[in-house]
């Protein structure tokens, strides 16, 4: 038995602010990452800088923001008022310093904690800030938040505004690389929420005239059933329509921040929307019938918002401000008045909405008996022992710093699921085992979800029957062999999600697990190779006569080795949907009964591949 641990004066450490940020970056920017995912830290750094420029625009200063990203370096130049020249050092390197604390003008800003660009400074190997105001300019340069050069105020011909240039520290962000698609999505949201703002990114122009209407048109992958309803008021903007898809699809924002995990405002919006529509038609519709196929967005402005995490993806505020109404009452009053008025004035829209609700009601009633039996069957199936090896931490837990790390692997076969189960982190990683190939669900109604045991149990494991709010895992990872059968299972699962739960994919929750095709090793080192190119490079690095293993399936990889592929460096390919991905047409071509057309497509593409080879 060990003796008591000493606890003395020297055990108490006071860290400089920048050292605390560098040691605990997750507290300030969420996860680190290398740029492979939209929520990786390097994009949070960019966003922290941009938020200040957006605040200037919202105050009425500077209609253009220029963003340049080149070889891992970032420049943001706005044309606002510019940081007061005597405070350039303070706002970039003194904690809890900013214009937003006592200024009513900034009460509806995204962040009030005074950390923003100071965290960027601390996590950058080089950071430069230059402010221009009324013919004068002040510039300061840093390395990891320590001043390396501070220039005196000088005269300038430059327009008013602030320029920030930074290089994320490679000691913290290993082998990082910015990806255009993530930056462009971020910038699109900024202009959708700030009509009239122009953002120039590496020379490409982003601009929106119609706000959230443009956002919905950009993101919808099915045609709306009626023109998008657009409602605007002080501190609130809402857009609503329905489409012929299952599930619900929402985009929510607070003070310009995309709250991907929703929060109090989204909950209030969903509840109020259903209630107002019921009252308008004076019918006791089920809320699920009203919401099926709905596509909507809400943006509100809250005084001094409280978020549930530093990365501000979920709103926790219950009030609009210290002296304002609750979030629920504010949204409820607005929707009750404005949506009710709109539906009375636009009868063609209200009739189209009613037809959609009645269709959803008809289908629900047709499968009501099957649904009840399926729920009972899911309980009796002893889910936790038969199909699901669950984890301890879930996305829908009320508390927990790591719940966004929760994931579930969907795999096929006992050997593969066995390897993953023995290798996984039981706190955060669950495993769902399929039996054989899933059914091709294309063209089938939702009744099949309850009649098919595999789909019924999968839906129950994910807890998504009533929408994404109950989703138990942040990442749903399809883990199948990299052969023809494995690819087919992937396609069948993606078809199932696209058919019945497209919001799961649009919410960036579905991924494909990459596993190595080859193992190359010599006596000193082992290389795992995910492509033929990596195999050749590994063979060259290994020298003469390396041992080469071709993995034919996941079941062949030992649990000890599998730990290398599902740990912190796990390679995942996100399943994404873009505006041009018209789901109905895409599924009809790849999964429908047009066998000859599809066969011709395959043959033609095989010929092209041979020509390239």
Image (cartoon, grey):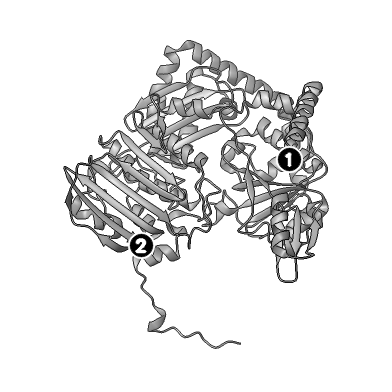
Question: Horizontally, is 278 left or right of 139 in the view?
Answer: right
Helix, strand, or loop for circle 1? helix
In this view of the protein, which residue sits in the foreground, 125 or 326? Answer: 125
Q: Residue at x 42, y 80 (%)?
A: 11
Quarter location, residue 541: bottom right
Q: Quadrant of the N terminus?
A: bottom right
Helix, strand, or loop for circle 2? strand
Quarter location, residue 438: top right
Tell me residue 49's x, y (percent): 36, 48
Residue topped by disc 2: 143
Tell me residue 318's x, y (percent): 39, 44
Question: Horizontally, is 449 left or right of 230 in the view?
Answer: right
Residue topped by disc 1: 490
Tell me residue 165's x, y (percent): 35, 50
Question: Horizontally, is 250 left or right of 231 in the view?
Answer: right
Q: Residue at x 43, y 37 (%)?
A: 187
Regarding residue 314, the answer to whether it shows in the image is yes
In this view of the protein, which residue sits in the foreground, 103 or 233? Answer: 103
Earlier-in-chain disc, 1 versus 2:
2
Relative vertical location of residue 136 with respect to residue 119 in this rendering, above or below: above
Relative vertical location of residue 581 with respect to residue 409 in this rendering, above or below: above
């Amino acid at each position: 038995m060990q003796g008591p641990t000493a606890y003395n004066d020297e055990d108490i450490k006071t860290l400089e602010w920048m050292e605390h940020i560098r040691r605990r970056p997750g507290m300030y920017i969420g996860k680190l990452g290398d740029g492979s995912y939209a929520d990786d830290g390097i994009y949070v750094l960019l966003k922290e800088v941009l938020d200040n420029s957006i605040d200037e625009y919202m105050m009425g200063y500077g209609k253009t923001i220029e963003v340049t990203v080149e070889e891992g370096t970032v420049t943001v130049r706005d044309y606002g008022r510019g940081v007061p020249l005597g405070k350039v050092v303070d706002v970039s390197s003194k904690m809890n310093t900013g214009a937003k604390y006592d200024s009513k003008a900034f009460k509806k800003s995204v962040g009030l904690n005074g950390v923003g660009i100071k965290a960027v400074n601390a996590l950058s190997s080089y950071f430069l800030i230059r402010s221009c105001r009324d013919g004068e300019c002040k510039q300061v340069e840093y390395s990891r938040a320590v001043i390396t050069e501070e220039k005196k105020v000088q005269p300038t011909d430059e327009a008013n505004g602030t320029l920030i240039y930074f290089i994320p520290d490679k000691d913290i962000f290993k082998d990082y690389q910015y990806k255009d698609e993530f930056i462009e999505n971020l910038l699109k949201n900024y202009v959708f929420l700030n009509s009239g703002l122009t953002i120039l990114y590496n020379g490409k122009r982003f601009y929106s005239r119609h706000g959230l209407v443009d956002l919905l048109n950009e993101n919808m992958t099915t045609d709306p059933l009626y023109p998008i309803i657009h409602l605007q008021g002080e501190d609130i903007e809402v857009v609503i329509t329905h489409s012929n898809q299952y599930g619900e699809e929402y985009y929510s924002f607070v003070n310009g921040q995309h709250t991907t995990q929703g929060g109090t405002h989204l909950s209030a919006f969903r509840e109020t929307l259903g209630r107002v529509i019921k009252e308008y038609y004076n019918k006791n519709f089920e809320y699920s019938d009203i919401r099926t196929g709905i596509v909507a967005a809400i943006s509100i402005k809250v005084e001094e918002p409280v978020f549930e995490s530093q990365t501000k993806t979920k709103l926790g505020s219950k009030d609009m401000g210290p002296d304002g109404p609750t979030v629920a009452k504010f949204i409820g009053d607005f929707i009750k008045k404005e949506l009710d008025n709109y539906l009375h004035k636009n009868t063609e829209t209200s009739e189209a909405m009613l037809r959609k609700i009645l269709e959803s009601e008809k289908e629900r009633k047709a499968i009501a008996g099957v649904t009840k039996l399926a729920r009972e069957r899911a309980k009796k199936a002893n889910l936790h022992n038969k199909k699901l090896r669950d984890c301890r931490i879930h996305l829908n837990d009320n508390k927990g710093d790591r719940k966004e790390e929760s994931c579930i692997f969907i795999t096929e076969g006992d050997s593969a699921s066995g390897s993953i189960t023995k290798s996984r982190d039981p706190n955060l990683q669950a495993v769902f085992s399929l039996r054989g190939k899933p059914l091709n669900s294309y063209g089938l109604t939702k009744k099949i979800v309850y009649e098919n045991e595999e789909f019924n149990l999968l839906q129950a494991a994910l807890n998504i029957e009533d929408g994404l709010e109950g989703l138990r895992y942040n990442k749903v990872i399809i883990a199948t062999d990299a052969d023809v059968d494995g690819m087919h299972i992937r396609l069948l699962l993606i078809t199932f999600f696209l058919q019945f739960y497209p919001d799961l994919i649009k919410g960036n929750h579905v991924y494909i697990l990459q596993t190595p095709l080859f193992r190359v090793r010599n006596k000193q080192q082992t290389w795992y190779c995910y492509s033929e190119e990596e195999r050749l490079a590994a063979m060259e690095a290994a020298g003469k006569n390396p041992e080469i293993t071709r993995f034919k399936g996941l079941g062949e990889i030992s649990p000890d080795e599998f730990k290398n592929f599902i740990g912190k460096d796990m390679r995942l390919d996100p399943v994404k949907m873009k505006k041009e991905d018209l789901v109905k047409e895409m599924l009809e071509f790849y999964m429908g009964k047009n066998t000859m057309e599809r066969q011709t497509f395959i043959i033609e593409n095989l010929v092209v591949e041979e020509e390239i080879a």
